[in-house]
Image: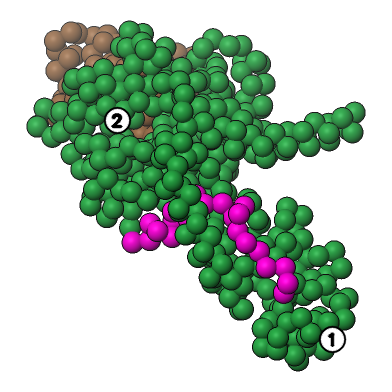
Amino acid sequence: MNVLNFMQSFFSDGSHWHGRDGIPQRVWEHVQYTAEALAIASAIGLPVGLVTGHTRRGGNALAFLSAGARALPTFGLLVLMFFWLGIGIVPVMIPLVVLAVPPVLVTTYEAVRTVDPSPVDAARGMGMPEARILFQVEVPAALPLILSGLRSATVQIVSTATIAAYVSLGGVGRYILDGLYQHDYGKVVGGAALTAVLALLALLLFWAVGRVAVSPGVRRRRAA
Amino acid sequence: MAGIERRLIRLRTLVHVIAPRAGKAVPEGFRRLIAIEDVSKRYADGTVAVDRLSLQIPDRSITVLVGPSGCGKTTTLRMINRMIEPSSGTIRVDGEDVRARPVNTLRRSMGYVIQNAGLFQHRTILDNIATVPRLLGWSRQRARERAAELMERVGLDPAMARRYPYQLSGGQQQRVGVARALAADPPILLMDEPFSAVDPVVRRGLQEELLRIQGELGKAIVFVTHDMDEAITVGDRIAVLRTGGRLAQFAAPDEILSSPADPFVEEFLGSDRGIRGLSFLSTRDLELDRSRVFSVGSDLREISGRAPEGVPVLVTDADGRPLGWADPGSWDGDVEALEPHGPVFEVGRDSLRVALDRAVLSPTGQAVGVDGSGKVLGVAGQETVAAAIRSARRRRAADAPQEAPAVKAGR
């Protein structure tokens, strides 16, 4: 049997479409883990990135911290947290957040720091308060890059959230893990395919957000 | 309705033509608006950007800060709106220390134009211009109405209101920058190398536009440039700064050209300050020769009778507009056979510099002087222009330098 046959057998099985272990339930759990981890990572990464980018200070410390965070093995962290905190959502969230903060933080910092300095100088010279300079001049110009940081963080969370299954939680990782134990390769391939589809949907979502949120003046300029 | 509008536009055009002179020629009794008093800027590493500078910047005039890079001209400008704080000394606006007011209130009361315009790429042209009114708490609608007025004032097509900065040329962007600085009608305009990033032709247009706007609005403009030609073109007063932030000379452009304070200023002016100084001398009193001008309908024998053979004559059409040069001995009346007369100068409006330039360019060595409608008033040779230069110089020398009005005779 090849991969397509595995996928066909998995998705055509009616029992996979309802109940506690059904696809809608597992996908919903996966989306929840992702949204939660992204929200926490953004709550940490965006403000710190915006402020350091605006003041152009602390770039070295940020690079150091994020390199450290990236060096941490996600799975190792999960196991460590599991033994420390026991079963629950928290031991899953910590490694996912540690994974997602660096791209959000570093990209936001770089995005704001590298905004063309002349509009910022003009805004300051016209008497615009610093907070408005940040949110009305720098962020709109930096938005495409900030969104790309959030997007890559999201894609990483989506694919990594499969590890929740290792500590008895749900998500589409459940199929991969259970399939491996049960030697049901249809399930493994089905779980992997669902992960990939979710990651693609996340990309689509960010593309749509970019279309709506980024000013045509900034978008076309980058394209030009 | 349309008729009234047209008349209004005509009236506006008239104002444009008259006003620039009115705005420029007030050499004495300026209200002192910005007073820079013994100001220095030293950085922690010991660099001195500005060294004990004192300048009185008058109202209703353009004061240019010019000098080589590192002379502290931009630093001086940015200390006026407190983008940079001086290490010592005081800057006053209308007698009040700039530090007395909250910094953002101060900045909103001064227009600010920078080199690359610094437009907000994510906002439309209209919303860019509406920035300061919005900061001052105007409603969005009122701010946009004001912005639309400003677009007209700086000569921008109203169709550009909804466009984004990337859709505009560099020159247009800089017009938007000027409109944005003027939006809240501040009494002071600070311009930091505003036209340095555009090509010379566009720069010329922007400079003329600035002079026109200044004629209408009469602001106190502080204008930073490294280009002496630009300083002479736009400045009512020029402060020449030398490296290390010290004032070398502060005077009207013609005075700087005719009597530079020291070798530094002289070197900075370049090798042709004599020619450039002619920009300040009017062609009003230039002696024009009418005897060599003939209408195309004139009798050929009359022409050759009055003009000796070999001395070219200028042939005009029936309305008096120039057609070209002819040799009275050999010309047979064929308009096609005339030698082109080249560019002309407008008597009274153009300077002696223009007249001399036309004489140099002319195939006969004679510059063609016309009136406002393009009719020939007469011709003047290089020697005649040279004589006019000498007598204008004598007249100016006889006058006290302060009383000589800084009439800038156009181009």
Say whether disc 2 or disc 1 marks the residue closer to the N-terminus. Answer: 2
The span from disc 2 to disc 1 (Cα, nearest Å) is 69 Å
Instruction: Name the spot of residue B298 as percent of width and height, x first.
Output: 86, 77
User: What residue do we see at 85% from left, 64% from top?
Assistant: B319
Letter of the chain in green = B
User: What residue do we see at 38% from left, 57% from top?
Assistant: B273
- Name the subunit of mark 1: B
Checking the image for residue A32, the label placed there is none
Relative to A35, say whether B11 is above or below: below
Relative to B285, say whether B130 is above or below: above
Q: What secondary structure characterizes most of the magenta part?
A: loop
For numbered disc 2, what is the local secondary structure? helix
Nearer to me, B331 or A140: B331
Relative to B147, say whether B215 is above or below: below
Identify the colour of chain A in the image.
Answer: brown
Residue at the front extreme? Answer: B398
Relative to A166, say whether B247 is above or below: below
Q: Is residue B280 magenta?
A: yes
- Of circles 2 and 1, the one toward us is 1
User: What residue do we see at 30% from left, 19% from top?
Assistant: B91
Find disc 2 in the rendering and name its residue.
B76
Numbered marks: total? 2
Span shown in magenta: B271-292
User: What residue do we see at 25% from left, 36% from top?
Assistant: B247
Instruction: Name the spot of residue B199 as percent of width and height, x first.
Output: 48, 54
Question: In this rendering, would B15 be left or right of B356?
Answer: right
| Residue B180 visible in image | no
